[in-house]
Amino acid sequence: MTNNKLLKSVAFYALVVVIVVFSIFPFYYAIVTSFATGTALFETNYFPKSFDWANYEAVLGGRTFPRNILNSVFVATTTVVFALFLAVTASYALARVRFRGRGLLLMTILAVSMFPQIAVLAGLFELITYLGLFNSPFALILSYTIFTLPFTVWVLTTFMRDLPVEIEEAAIVDGATPWIIVTKVFLPLLWPALVTTGLLAFIGAWNEFLFALTFTSSEVTRTVPVAIALLSGASQQEIPWGPIMAASVIVTVPLIILVLIFQRKIVAGLTAGGVKG
């Protein structure tokens, strides 16, 4: 029995190591490649021979890439603020207010996320053009918020359903309005779910490419995924792998840091409502 447990433990940790290596290796190799220049870019090196910062200097010293980073920060942050505000208010209504068709409405909201981006691209483009938002950050904020809301509403509604009813009843007895209940009573208890949905919404907006490519047309309004994809070399035939890898590392490291900082909150938010006591 002891040998069987030992073998299972060894197999489990071996599988974990394989998964971790498989997941991390592409990013690690991107870091190694970002320090290579010239012919070293086409050599297979698993460890950097030298730390040449030329690729990072070329990217950060470019005309618009720092502006593209600021665009991504602004768009992603604003998307998170709008999505969480709408999702918190909607989740309160769906979780606490009884009305006919509540379950159907929640399923309909979730069903919106099943549509691929390409299926709604033409219609969304017409809407953005009609509103005069084309080639502006607000075109991306609108489209990202639309696609982020279903997930945020679903998670926050599930989380809010698990909050004790007695807390809300006590607040009502004290004369609290629904807005006070949401902001002063429920909001402090929703932090795990808010961090989870907010961070995932931020990552989705930060990495999104199709809408950013379609709804922006100038260098100064692009976000980082489009800016990286459109990096060009000295000629049309040259692909600047070094700067591309350096730019990818620059925009990925902040996301990794955020996930590591809030990893416990993320797990708590994703498992909310999964276990009933």
Image (cartoon, helix red, strand yellow):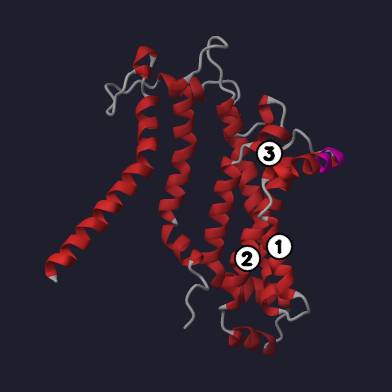
Tell me the SS state at disc 1: helix
Label 3: how many Cα within 10 Å (few below 14, some 14–19, many 20+): some
Q: Residue at x 73, y 35 (%)?
A: 215
Q: Position of residue 198 (x, y in %)?
A: 57, 56
Q: Which residue is mark 1?
A: 109
Instruction: State the CA–CA distance, disc 2 to disc 3.
Output: 23 Å
Horizontal side of residue 91 vs 32, given as left or right: right
Q: Residue placed farthest to the right in the image?
A: 130
Q: Residue at x 35, y 35 (%)?
A: 28
Q: Which residue is mark 2?
A: 154
Q: Earlier in the sequence, mark 2 or mark 1?
A: 1
Q: Residue at x 57, y 11 (%)?
A: 236
Tell me the SS state at disc 3: helix
Q: Which residue is mark 3?
A: 211
Asked whether disc 1 touches disc 3, contact meaning CB atoms under 8 Å apart, the reply is: no
Q: Position of residue 268 (x, y in %)?
A: 46, 66
Q: Relative to 136, say whether 4 is above or below.
A: below
Q: Which residues are magenta?
A: 126-130
Instruction: State the CA–CA distance, disc 1 to disc 3.
Output: 21 Å
Tell me the SS state at disc 2: helix
Horizontal side of residue 140 vs 197, given as left or right: right
Screen quadrant of the N terminus: bottom left
